[in-house]
Amino acid sequence: MRGTGLFFDGETRRPFCPGDFLFAPAGRAHRFEQFSDDFATWVVYYGPEGGERAVEQAVREDCAVEASQMHTGPLSAYLIQDLPGFTPQIGRLVVMMNYARVTTVQAVEGLTTRQLDYLHDSGSNTIGALVGHVAAVEVAYQVHTFEGRDLSEHERKEWNTFLELGEQARREIRGHPPEYYMRLLTDVRQKTLRALAQRTDQWLYEQAPFWGGQPANNYFKWFHVLEDEINHRGQIRWLRKRLPG
């Protein structure tokens, strides 16, 4: 290890310095943050015999995530195009999802905890609750489309208040700093991108009964995740304009 900075292992952040050895469990999102200009490191993968394919797959997925994140700048954000590491249709979907996410983050940029908790009236949701809802909807569609199941009891306990919003959310979703919400969005999206990098365009068109028993494909379901975020981003912008001075 050379240089200094912070290492996020998927759960906690810790400072690092030259000579440190850092460990991240397989399959958990992790990254280096706020690192110095001279930062460099060796990456070592290890595991049981036969795990080489899993390592190769993890490297491909990491590259796909990094490539997708590089296409959110001011110039390329306006081009719906193929992305390295994704099949053509999935790559274009990711471009649109990334653009929506950039505008959501911009809509809450600079807000304080107090502003995130501001309740415009007794029937409104706070900005913080709406940001959490965006992440929770994505989690629900991850397990639905990637794993073919509903949220588990544990997942319901973790995400249900964000999913349902309303009175319970008005009581319970309070006091979180901006970093809390940004971490929710980032961690959930990285899991989505890694899963999408493993799938083909054919997967997008796979159908199953959906709302009211009507057939829907995975393409529509992830379009719904995208348009749901845009809908709530509009609410966030409306609420931000009405924050007390």
Image (cartoon, rainbow, N blue to C red):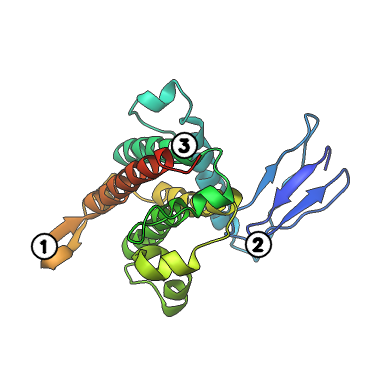
The residues tagged by marks 3 and 1 sit, at their Cα atoms, a distance apart of 32 Å
Q: Can residue 56 be seen here? A: no
Q: Report crowding for label 1: few under 14, some 14 to 19, many 20 or more residues within 10 A (C-alpha).
A: few
Q: Position of residue 32 (x, y in %)?
A: 69, 44
Quadrant housing the N terminus: top right
Q: Is residue 116 above or below residue 143?
A: above
Residue type marked 2:
Pro
Residue 64 or residue 14, whichever sits in front: 14
Horizontal side of 69 relative to 95 (left or right) equals right
Q: Residue at x 82, y 48 (%)?
A: 16
Dot label at residue 34 = none
Residue 232 or residue 93, whichever sits in front: 232
How many numbered marks have been drawn onto this rendered protein structure? Answer: 3
Question: What residue sits right under mark 1 in the picture?
Answer: 214
Question: What residue sits right under mark 3 in the picture?
Answer: 68
Q: Is residue 178 above or below residue 147?
A: above
Q: Is residue 67 above or below residue 180?
A: above
